[in-house]
Image (cartoon, rainbow, N blue to C red):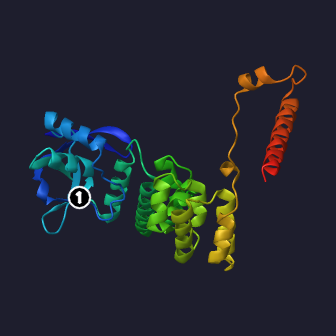
Amino acid sequence: MIYSSLCNGKDILNIEKAIPIPIEKLFDFPNHPFKVNDDKEMENMVETVKAGGIIMPLIVRQKADGNYEIISGHRRKMASQKAGLKEVPCIIRNFNDDEAIIKMVDSNMQRTKILPSEKAFAYKMKLEAEKHQGQRKDLTSDQIGQKLESKTTREKVAEELGESATNIQRYIRLTELIPELLKLVDEERVAFSPAVDLSYLTEDEQYVILNIYDYDDKTPNVSQARHLKLLSQEGKLTADKIEEIMGEQKPNQVEKIKINAEKIQSLLPREVTTERQTEEFIIKCIKEHNQREKRKMEMTR
C-alpha cells in the first residue's frame, strides 16, 4: 500500500510504502505519555477496524533486536488486537531518539481530548528533545547563524503546539506533582492554576494536601495554593498550617439560597416593592417566627 504523508507542517506528495508487520513485533514508545483507554471510543474504533481494516498505517522505527517501536498509532494497535488482526500496515522511519520523540508528541496532539497530565509529560519530552536537536545544530552552524537565532526553544515549541510559552512551562510544572494529585487534576477535582502552585510544594507537603482531600474533600483555590507555595518556599509550611489554610471557607463553598421571585412577590405586602425592602421584610418575618418558637418552647418547660 502507498500513502502520502505530512512533512514539516506542509502537504507534499511523499510516497511511502506501508508493509504489514505482526502485532507481536510492535512495542509501545518508552514513557509514552498519552493514555490508551479501553473505552467507548475504543469500542467504536474496533468496529471500524473490523469493517474496513487499518486505513492509516502506524509509524514505527526498527529496534536493535529486530522488533519495532511505535511512534504513532498506539490506539490503532490496540484496536487491531481487539479486532483480532494478526498484523497491521506500518511505515518504517529511520528516526533518532529525539526525532522519534518529537514525531510521537506531534502526532498525538491531534487527539480531540488531551488530559493535563498527558500534555505535561508530552510537552516536557518534546521540549527536551528540541533542545537536544538545537544543540546539535549549533555544533554545525556558523557564528552568524547562531546570532540570527532569536527564539528560545520553548518559544519554538509553543508556536508548534499552539500554546503560549508560559503555558508550556506551567504544564511542565505539573510533572512535579505526586501521581495522586496529578490524577485529581485530570479528573478536574483540582483546578489547573492551583495545581501549578502546588507543584512547588515538597512531596511530603503534597501528601498532606492529598490526605486533607481524602478525609474532607477539600482542595485549595488559587489564593490558598499561592499562600501554600509561598510558605513552602520560605520553609515555614507545616502540616498544621496546611490544615489551617485549607480549612478557610472559600466563597464558592458558601451555600446560596435560591428563592422563587414570583412566589415571594405574590405574598408580599403592596408597600414592599424594592429588592432591599423584600430582604428586610423576609428577615423580619424570620425573626418573628424564631421569637414565637422560642416562646412556645418556654411555655412547655
> Where is residue 190 shown, x and y percent of the image?
54, 56
Left or right of 87, for residue 119: right
In front of the other: 62 or 253: 253
Nearer to us in this view, 234 or 22: 234
Residue at far right of view? 271
In this rendering, does residue 123 appear at all?
Answer: no
Q: Which residue is mark 1?
A: 94
Using residue 285 as the reference point, say whether residue 6 is left or right of it: left
Q: Quick one: quadrant of the C terminus?
A: bottom right
Element class at badge 1: loop
Residue type, label 1: Asn
| Residue 128 at least partly seen | yes
Tell me which corner region of the image, top left, top right, bottom left or bottom right, holds residue 264.
top right
In this rendering, the count of numbered labels is: 1
Q: Position of residue 131 (x, y in %)?
A: 45, 65
Rendered location of residue 146, percent (x, y): 52, 63
**Image position, residue 89 (x, y; %):** 15, 46
Examine the image and state in which quarter residue 3 appears: top left
In percent of the image, x 72 and y 23: which residue is there?
Answer: 263
Category of crowding for the residue at label 1, using alpha-carbon neighbours closer than 10 angstroms: few (below 14), some (14–19), many (at least 20): few
- Depth check, front residue: 219 or 9: 219
Q: Is residue 282 above or below residue 213?
A: above
Q: What residue lies at 51% left-to-right and 49% top-to-bottom? A: 159
Quarter of the figure with the N terminus: top left
Please give the name of the residue rendered at 20% of the width and 50% of the height, measured from the top-left corner.
Answer: 77
Q: Is residue 292 left or right of residue 178?
A: right
> From this viewpoint, which residue is outermost toward the bottom?
235
Q: Residue at x 26, y 43 (%)?
A: 42
